[in-house]
Structure formats: C-alpha cells, structure tokens
Amino acid sequence: MNITESLKLQADLQAQIDQIQSRLLSCVRVEKGSKPLEKPENLYKLQDKLLKQLGTAYSKMERAIYHAAYKDKSLIEMLSEQKILTLQIKLMKETLNKANELTSLEGVCYEPTIDIKLLEKQLFTLEELKRDIDSKIQSLFQITKV
C-alpha cells in the first residue's frame, strides 16, 4: 500500500467512524418504555475497533513519510515547503487584489503603492514552485510504501 492508498483508507475509516457515531447518538436515549434500535455497547465496540485501525494506519503512514525523500529533501521538508508556498501565494493574491482596487464604493480613487507587475511575476514564480513541489510530493505518495 502506498501513501495515496493509505490516505484513502484513512478517509474511509473516518467516514465509518462518523457513521457509527451518528448511529450511536440516535440510540443513546429513547422515549420512556421504548428500546433502542441498536445496543450502544455494540456500537462502542465497533467504533473502538475502527479507531484502533485508524491509529495503526496513521502510525504506518507517519513512519513512511518520515523516511521518504526526493533527492536531497525529505518528504516532511517538502510538505512544510508546500504549506508555506500555499500561504505565500494566498497572501500575495490578497495583496494584489487590494492593490488593484482603484475605486471604492464611495467613489474614492486610489493608486497602488507597490509594483503590481513585479508582484505578479513573483506570484507566477511561486505558483510554478508550488506546482513542482506538488508533483514531487504526489509521486512520492504513489511510490512510498506504507
């Protein structure tokens, strides 16, 4: 199993846990004199079993991520870099959007105080870097065994 498959398994387990929780919540109380459709104890046991499986899947994947690398960079470093690039791109886009607002609703005219063309070039470069790191991470996810 590779990291991509492990992520899918984790999502499936989480969905099953959520479904059991929903069933559990519907049977933890009933109208006086009624019986629950399912025994809460059975649902607790099933939920506990799935939580243990999820914990094992998390541990195996974390171990695999810790040891995976692309050339001279660990997967952990690449995932951190991906998060920072994502944040940088978001902040830069917000800055560009604000700088490009040349009039307000009240009719006030504004002019940018930054070099928009330069910022757009920097944004383009960051987006290229992010696409590159996304591609490398994806390939590691597919080849790294859990």
Image: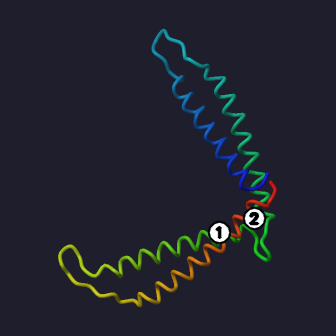
- Where in the figure is residue 26, as x and y percent of width and height? 51, 25
Q: Position of residue 5 (x, y in %)?
A: 73, 51
Residue 20 appears left or right of 1: left
Of 29 and 57, nearer the camera is: 57
Q: Going by the image, does 38 lie left or right of 64?
A: left
Q: Residues within 10 Å of mark 2 (few under 14, many from 20)?
A: some
Q: Is residue 133 above or below residue 47?
A: below
Amino acid bearing label 2? Leu
Q: Quadrant of residue 82?
A: bottom right
Look at the picture and state if 140 lies above or below 21: below
Is 71 drawn above or below residue 30 in the view shown? below
Label 1–label 2 contact, CB within 8 A: no
In this picture the colour scheme is: rainbow
Residue at 80% over, 54% down: 146
Q: Amino acid at mark 1?
A: Asp
Residue for point 61% across, 23% down: 40
Residue under numbered circle 1: 134
Q: What label sits on residue 140 in the rendered view?
A: 2
